[in-house]
Image (cartoon, rainbow, N blue to C red):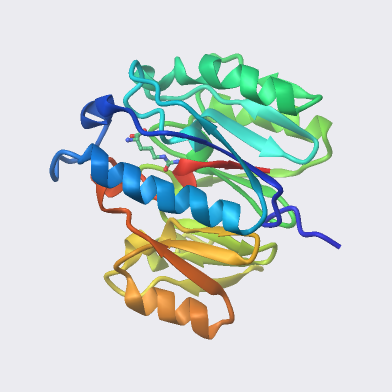
Amino acid sequence: MTDPTYEFTRAVTRRPAASIVNGLRAEDIGTPDLARMEDAHAHYVATLKQTGAEVIELPALEAFPDSVFVEDTALCLPKGAVLMRPGAPSRMGEVAVMAPTLDALYDELRRIEGPGHIEGGDILVTGREILVGRSDRTDAEGVAELTRIVSDWGYSLREVFTPPGVLHFKTDCSLLDGETILSTKRLDASGCFEGYRVLHTAEGEEAAANSIRFNQFVLCPAGFPRTAEMLTNHGFEVVEINNSECAKLDGGMSCLSLRF
Ligand code: CIR
């Protein structure tokens, strides 16, 4: 039996563009270095491939500085994919560019038509439900429209809330297996993970929460040794990936791929 929440045969990524220096960020903590980001991205893609998965690597898109963060453009489920409607106006056009790739891979491709907004970074698919965090990028109308689409496919969706000042719901959490979530203490304190097994990031290592389980590996941003050790002690096979450049743009492990 495979577990569709973390056992994947495919991923879609997009190479970072030189325009990444103009990417969105909540706070300016320095200009991302393209060469360093490309190195880390290559390590990320190689790690996904090492699991045996096929990685569809899309070319850099100069017109969209944040387009390396492909996760925000779509939700990929076993039964179909849904094109998102980003709340960041500068990112809206990324969706149309992603559409043909998913159209070729899925029999069922639906889209959020609006007027609401929703970004993939706010969606966590667990073994029992789809959690969507309202945020500055994801509003009630966007959540309602996604609810209608996925309920046609038999999924239940629960609306939750991304903590204030946090970009996306998954900035603060990730799925380790169908029943286990890695979360910051602040997000878990909201009660949204009741009934799940929750592992907390170490104090001061909140940025490690944006990790991904991909087949046998947990890809974690490098530099959070206590969280990595905790995950290893729980039996997960951790691969640390340098995230220094994406972190300058509030990006992490989940943002860099669509996985299905
Ligand atoms: C943005 O603000 O949209 C990008 N700079 C970062 C997007 C990160 N995406 C994600 O967490 N899913």
Q: Is residue 110 left or right of residue 88?
A: right
Q: Is residue 133 visible?
A: no
Residue 58 x/y as whole percent? 51, 29
- The quarter in which the C terminus is drawn is top right
The one of 92 and 212 positioned closer to us in this rendering: 212
Q: Is residue 232 visible?
A: yes
Residue 116 x/y as whole percent? 53, 20
Instruction: Please identify the residue farthest to the bottom as the structure is shown.
Output: 233
- The quarter in which the N terminus is drawn is bottom right
**Numbered circles on residues, count:** 0
The one of 160 and 199 positioned closer to us in this rendering: 199
The correct choice, above or below, for 155 with respect to 113 in the image is below
Residue 227 x/y as whole percent? 40, 74
Residue at horizontal 45%, vertical 42%?
Answer: 255
The correct choice, above or below, for 141 with respect to 229 in the image is above
The correct choice, above or below, for 9 with respect to 62 in the image is below
The correct choice, above or below, for 253 with respect to 62 in the image is below
Residue at horizontal 22%, vertical 26%?
Answer: 22
Residue at horizontal 34%, vertical 15%?
Answer: 63
Q: Is residue 65 left or right of residue 232?
A: left
Q: Is residue 78 left or right of residue 58?
A: right
Instruction: Tell me the quadrant of ligand 1.
Output: top left
Instruction: Please identify the residue farthest to the right as the structure is shown.
Output: 1
